[in-house]
Image (cartoon, rainbow, N blue to C red):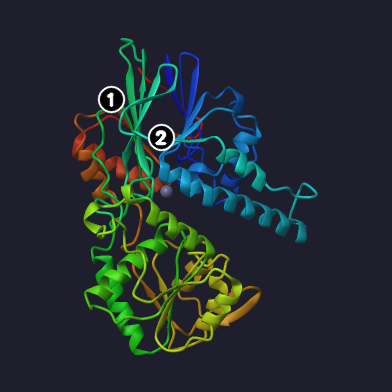
Amino acid sequence: MATLTFWGGVGTVTGSKYLVESQGQRVLVDCGLFQGLKELRERNWNPLPFDARDLDAIVLTHAHIDHTGYLPKLVADGYRGPVFCSRGTAELAKILLPDSARLQAEEAEYRNRHSLTRHTPARPLYTEDDAYNALNRLSPVRHEEKAFQIAPGIHASFFPAGHLLGSRCVLLEIEGAGEDKSGRKILFSGDLGHTNPLVLRDPDPPAACDYLLVESTYGDRLHDSTPPDEALAKIINRAAQRDNIILIPAFSVGRTQEILFTLRKLEDAKRIPILPVYVDSPMAIEATELYLKLAEEFDETLLDRAHRIPLRTRETHFTASRGDSRRINEARGARIVISAAGMMTGGRILHHAQRVLPDPSATLLFVGYQAEGTTGRRILEGETEVKIMKQMFPVLCHIERVEGFSSHPDYNEILVWLEQSPAPPRTLFLTHGEPAASASLNKKIQQKFGWNTHIPTYGETFELV
Ligand SMILES: [Zn+2]
């Protein structure tokens, strides 16, 4: 008997962990950290409902922390098997997992300083050493579209998902599974990208499968139909006339590179003036170098003669050191500063925000999702004063927003993707969504295709008949 159990990424967009069991073999697809609400984050601290040492293999769809961030803990708890992933995912994890460990340490330190802990002293969920031990288990796959054995009787193959550098849909083939013992195939969408992502290869259509898990992050939303480059050009031109700074908070991995790529495209088409662009985030610099290394990830039409993708504008300055970062403040005139964190929850962006927010001729431009409770969200919602590093600042600058850079598909794009399935799955599972988003997409899928669908709950086990 083969089963599938949902240990995360259901009822929420975080903590993705899907356990497949068949003939004594146990395979975990994704190993994400729960984030956001406190009741979810507490799950990271609860003992796992299975023993880390009993797992035979782990497969990762992509490197985002809500899909990989629990891995260091699992390895610290005794997992000694391989972690299969694409080359891009392995490379990005080298940047993101140690960073996640540093954030855990900062959070523990904060709790200790403010006596916010039940345990004294508060400890991080895992350390940087744990993160490096987890990286040692990564096994990047070479010929990923051909099925390869990940455990006895279980094969995997990968297909581009268009969501992030290295992101893949994962197809598992389980020998002898099902009532007729003919084997069963499960396709995990992971996180999907747009139908036409900006820089990455387009997602592959769904492979033939018996069971399909599809993400539903924006299952109840349609994106703004204005192309992001058009929206961006309009805002940059308007802001440039004010001859002042344009500050863009952006996640260092993925979004920053998309913005650089789009700005360059607009400059080359003479749709915006050539402005100095400062990228102020050490992690963004590392990630940009990595993007330049992995040509296989990109839409071929975008590569230049040297088979590289242009990820810098005509006048880009990457600032690694804090000294360089301070020098940006001395610059004058129309200029663009891209910095992290993307939701203004910490990082170097806060130093820039202190100068930009009270300045009526400056521009703050959001290009990513701003979650509830973040400084970015408060500014977007029109608060006239916000707290930055314990000090209140009036919000007098121009606030702008471009929506089209989202890395998840809206419900129309998901329906278009599903429509390309070679045959209806026996069951389609809606995962990776807030309850309202999953329910809304579920209804649309049933109306359009009449498929057998199910919205799993945390800890639910499903027999793969
Ligand atoms: Zn993701």
**Residue 50 percent location from the top left of the image:** 58, 26
In this rendering, would 336 be left or right of 303?
A: right
User: What is the x, y in percent for residue 192?
Assistant: 33, 46
Counting residues from the start of the chain, the first of labels 2 and 1 encountered is 2
Q: Of circles 2 and 1, which is in front?
A: 2
Mark 1 belongs to which amino acid? Answer: Arg
- 395 or 205: nearer the eye? 205
Question: Can residue 4 be seen from the camera position used here?
Answer: yes
Say which quarter of the image contains residue 221: bottom left
**Quick check: 243 above or below 114?**
below
For residue 373, say whether it is visible.
no
Q: Is residue 400 above or below residue 167?
A: below
Left of 373 or right of it: where is 146?
Answer: left
Q: What residue sits right under mark 2 in the picture?
A: 141
Q: Which amino acid does label 2 sit on?
A: Val
Residue 281 at x, y percent in the picture = 52, 66
Which residue does the numbered mark 1 point to in the structure image?
426
